[in-house]
């Protein structure tokens, strides 16, 4: 095939994006582990590991810019590089969200847990991320549409969890101690933000599927 | 890049964040230089399936890939155009409408018939003895392939700029004035002067106007009587465009007009093409894919065997072509 160096660069980009995806998934998994068992070391590992994700993101961004500038991709190649360029941004943001989750893990008050297990939402979000990366690697348009549809399930779980926390807060008797109130508000806020960030991680996974669908079929349906 | 901390920064909602000489005879009259055309028979196997030159794809062209809806009027309406060079079938049943006041790019590999198609639009193929043209080409509804068509008048309406700048070995002024004088639009000769009807002033106005339109006036206005061959390649090409404009054409056909030019001269020609398309219909053959993408409103892709495979808005063709073979060609995977 002609333009071998170019074809190699495209393939390298694909495998590098998938590798970055695995790296981000590991961060998310570790953050969830921290949330689950309250241990300090997973949280610390996620916070320290974010620099590597950011570095990888910048390196891949440079690779995409180089491909645009030096190879001027068109048609399917253009959609592939454009999609990859956007997907690495989503991955980097999931990395940031994993850091947030690790921070919440450090101060998590289990008594405020909603009736929907945070672990369950986290695993659902991770599953969506894994599926969207597989769809990207396999160029699977049908999988992208299924991922977008399945996001509604996570949204519903998150809404139920948030409502549960709020309801619990309303029903709770609070000690007549300003510091206790302050602490409770911080804890509630932290649980609600945990739920929100997991929902956002899932949304970024859906973005990856949306960009992948555009990459495969030229169909921007899910991007909007 | 910053981490999203809940108290200082709110994450955006994720969903919203979302050819060369090879395909054109250099000396049109000489059969020895006929286009290197792959025949239709080469490109089509027994069951009618079409292959690339490398044979790695197998697809049938669909009519909708060539259907292009555009606003405004069509300058050219071409129907079932076939061109043969002797036994070679250079163009196969091409039907296409070209919108006026726009830039249409014709792209495709060497020998795909794009230059043949371009030359069909002002009957330049008539100059190739072995060429046989069948089908219909209408400009503003008038058939150009019929008896009684005045070819000089046709080529005045449909001008042409070639790959290599080819100014006359005359002064810059004479290069521009030559056409209008030949057509009798202006008279400046000794007889006209003797009879007191010399249009020298009109000629100078025309020379200035054409050179300005071709973005050359500022560079040459102090040396209009110098020989045009002393200009740089890019200037010579713009002079040829100015010369083409001097006879007041409606259409400008360009066959690789910038392939012999450096990037700066190329950029000037590309800017010029864009400006010209406001008043003229421009049809350009180019092997430079990025050039086609940059300057054209619509792109027609010809592939092996003289077949028009895809025609549509340039952004659609370059971002999401329908044909797999077109995709392979424009991404460089072809053959």
Image (tube, rainbow, N blue to C red):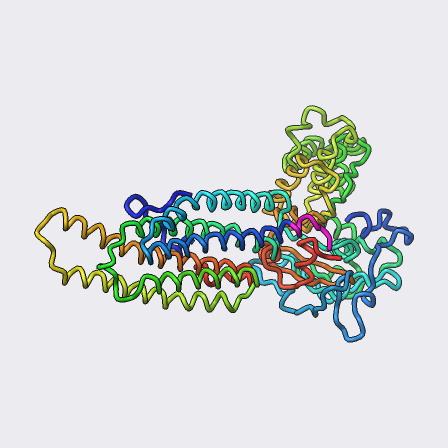
Observer able to see residue B279: no
Looking at the rendered image, the quarter that the N terminus of chain B falls into is top left
Whether A82 is drawn above or below B229: the answer is: below
- Residue drawn at the location 53% of the way across and 66% of the way down: A141
Q: How far from the left and from the top, in percent, is residue A175? A: 10, 54
**Which portion, as a residue range, is magenta?**
A1-8
Q: Main secondary structure of the magenta part?
A: helix
- Residue drawn at the location 32% of the way across and 67% of the way down: A156
Q: How far from the left and from the top, in percent, is residue A89? A: 46, 49
Q: How far from the left and from the top, in percent, is residue B174? A: 76, 33
In the rendered structure, the answer to whether residue B280 lies left or right of residue A202 reads right
How many numbered marks have been drawn onto this rendered protein structure? 0
- In the foreground, A25 or A161: A25
- In the foreground, B175 or B50: B50
- Residue drawn at the location 14% of the way across and 50% of the way down: A180
- In the foreground, B306 or A99: A99
Furthest residue in direction top, as rendered: B222
Looking at the rendered image, the quarter that the C terminus of chain B falls into is bottom right
In the rendered structure, the answer to whether residue B95 lies left or right of residue B320 reads right
- In the foreground, B122 or B152: B122
Q: How far from the left and from the top, in percent, is residue B294? A: 61, 47
């Amino acid at each position: 095939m002609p333009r071998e160096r170019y074809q190699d660069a495209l393939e390298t980009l694909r495998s590098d994006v998938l590798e970055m995806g695995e790296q981000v998934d590991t961060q998310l998994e570790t953050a969830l582990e921290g949330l689950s068992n309250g241990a300090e070391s997973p949280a610390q590992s996620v916070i320290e590991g974010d620099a590597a994700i950011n570095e990888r993101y910048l390196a891949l961004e440079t690779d995409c810019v180089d491909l645009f500038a030096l190879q001027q991709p068109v048609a399917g190649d253009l959609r592939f590089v454009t999609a990859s360029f956007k997907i690495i941004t989503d991955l980097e943001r999931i990395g940031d969200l994993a850091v947030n989750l690790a921070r919440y893990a450090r101060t998590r008050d289990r008594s405020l847990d909603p009736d929907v297990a945070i672990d369950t939402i986290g695993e659902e979000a991770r599953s969506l991320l894994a599926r969207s990366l597989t769809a990207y690697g396999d160029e699977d348009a049908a999988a992208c549409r299924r991922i977008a549809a399945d996001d509604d399930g996570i949204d519903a779980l998150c809404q139920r969890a948030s409502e549960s926390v709020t309801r619990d807060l309303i029903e709770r008797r609070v000690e007549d101690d300003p510091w206790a109130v302050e602490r409770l508000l911080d804890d509630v806020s932290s649980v609600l933000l945990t739920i929100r960030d997991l929902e956002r991680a899932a949304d970024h996974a859906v973005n990856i599927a949306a960009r992948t669908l555009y990459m495969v079929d030229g169909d921007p349906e899910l991007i909007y | 890049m910053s981490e999203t901390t809940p108290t200082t920064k709110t994450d955006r909602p994720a969903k919203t964040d979302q050819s060369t000489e090879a395909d054109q005879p250099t000396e049109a009259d000489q059969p020895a230089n006929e286009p290197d055309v792959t025949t239709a028979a080469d490109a089509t196997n027994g069951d009618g399936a079409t292959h690339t030159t490398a044979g790695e794809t197998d697809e049938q062209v669909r009519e909708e890939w060539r259907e292009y809806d555009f606003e405004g009027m069509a300058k050219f309406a071409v129907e079932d155009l076939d061109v043969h060079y002797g036994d070679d079938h250079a163009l196969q049943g091409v039907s296409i409408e070209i919108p006026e006041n726009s830039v249409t790019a014709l792209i495709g590999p060497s020998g795909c018939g794009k230059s043949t198609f371009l030359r069909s639009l002002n009957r330049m193929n008539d100059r190739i003895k072995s060429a046989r043209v069948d089908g219909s080409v209408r400009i503003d509804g008038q058939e150009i392939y019929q008896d009684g068509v005045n070819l000089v008048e046709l080529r005045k309406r449909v001008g042409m700029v070639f790959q290599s700048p080819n100014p006359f070995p005359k002064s810059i002024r004479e290069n521009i004035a030559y056409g209008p004088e030949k057509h009798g639009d202006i008279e400046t000769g000794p007889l006209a002067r003797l009879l007191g009807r010399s249009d020298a002033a009109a000629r100078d106005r025309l020379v200035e106007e054409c050179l300005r339109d071709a973005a050359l006036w500022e560079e040459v206005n102090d040396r209009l009587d110098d020989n045009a061959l002393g200009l740089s390649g890019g200037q010579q090409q713009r002079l040829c465009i100015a010369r083409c404009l001097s006879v007041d054409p409606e259409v400008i056909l360009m066959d690789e007009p910038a392939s012999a030019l450096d990037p700066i001269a190329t950029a000037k020609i590309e800017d010029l093409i864009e400006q010209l398309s406001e008043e003229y219909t421009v049809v350009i053959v180019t092997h430079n894919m990025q050039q086609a993408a940059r300057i054209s409103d619509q792109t027609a892709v010809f592939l092996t065997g003289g077949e028009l495979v895809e025609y549509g808005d340039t952004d659609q063709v370059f971002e999401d072509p329908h044909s797999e073979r077109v995709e392979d060609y424009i991404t460089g995977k072809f053959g």
